[in-house]
Image (spheres, rainbow, N blue to C red):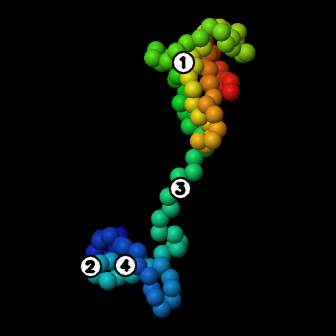
């Protein structure tokens, strides 16, 4: 925002010095940008983080299948919710994920 007119400042290049400036389209006031980055879009996200987020309350989901064949190593409870997900790339296979219905312990099986 400009100090004089409270208008939005837009990025512009000062061609004589090759620096990034912010310029008001109404009053032509300019100020030098603190950084040369105009926009950053980061789409790198760990699949492991995604799976951890998914697993937070999955044991309470009544629509997911349950098994009594995978006892929990932490509490010994036999009931666990399970689902399949792909961990890394399209070249990797599906992986089974289990969540204990008693204590929430998570484990996987390839």
Name the quadrant containing residue 24.
bottom left
| Closer to us: 43 or 13 | 43
Name the quadrant containing residue 52.
top right
SS at circle 1: helix
Look at the image and tell me whether residue 14 can be seen: yes
**Relative to 78, does residue 110 appear above or below in the rendering?**
below
Residue that badge 4 annotates:
23
Q: Residue visible at 62% across and 24% down?
A: 96
Q: Which percent across, then down, holds residue 50?
A: 56, 37
* Other-residue count near label 4 (Cα within 10 Å), few / some / many at <14 / 14–19 / ≥20: many
Residue that badge 1 annotates:
59
* Other-residue count near label 3 (Cα within 10 Å), few / some / many at <14 / 14–19 / ≥20: few
Q: CA distance from mark 4 to mark 1?
A: 54 Å
Proximity of marks 1 and 2: CB atoms separated by less than 8 Å:
no
Q: Which is nearer the N-term, disc 3 or disc 4?
A: 4
Q: Residue furthest front?
A: 91
Residue that badge 3 annotates:
42
What is the quadrant of the C terminus in the image?
top right
Proximity of marks 3 and 2: CB atoms separated by less than 8 Å:
no
Q: CA distance from mark 1 to mark 2?
A: 57 Å
Look at the image and tell me whether residue 48 can be seen: no
SS at circle 4: strand
Q: Which is nearer the N-term, disc 1 or disc 2?
A: 2
Q: Which is nearer the N-term, disc 3 or disc 2?
A: 2
Q: Which is nearer the N-term, disc 1 or disc 3?
A: 3
């Amino acid at each position: 925002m400009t100090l004089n007119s409270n208008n939005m400042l837009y990025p512009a290049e000062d061609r004589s010095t090759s620096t990034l400036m912010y310029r008001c389209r109404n009053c032509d006031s300019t100020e030098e940008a603190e950084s040369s980055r105009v926009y950053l879009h980061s789409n790198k996200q760990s699949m492991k983080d995604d799976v951890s987020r998914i697993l937070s309350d999955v044991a309470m989901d009544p629509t997911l299948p349950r098994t009594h064949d995978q006892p929990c190593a932490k509490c010994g409870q036999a009931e666990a919710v399970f689902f399949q997900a792909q961990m890394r790339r399209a070249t990797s296979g599906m992986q089974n994920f289990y969540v204990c219905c008693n204590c929430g312990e998570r484990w996987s099986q390839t």
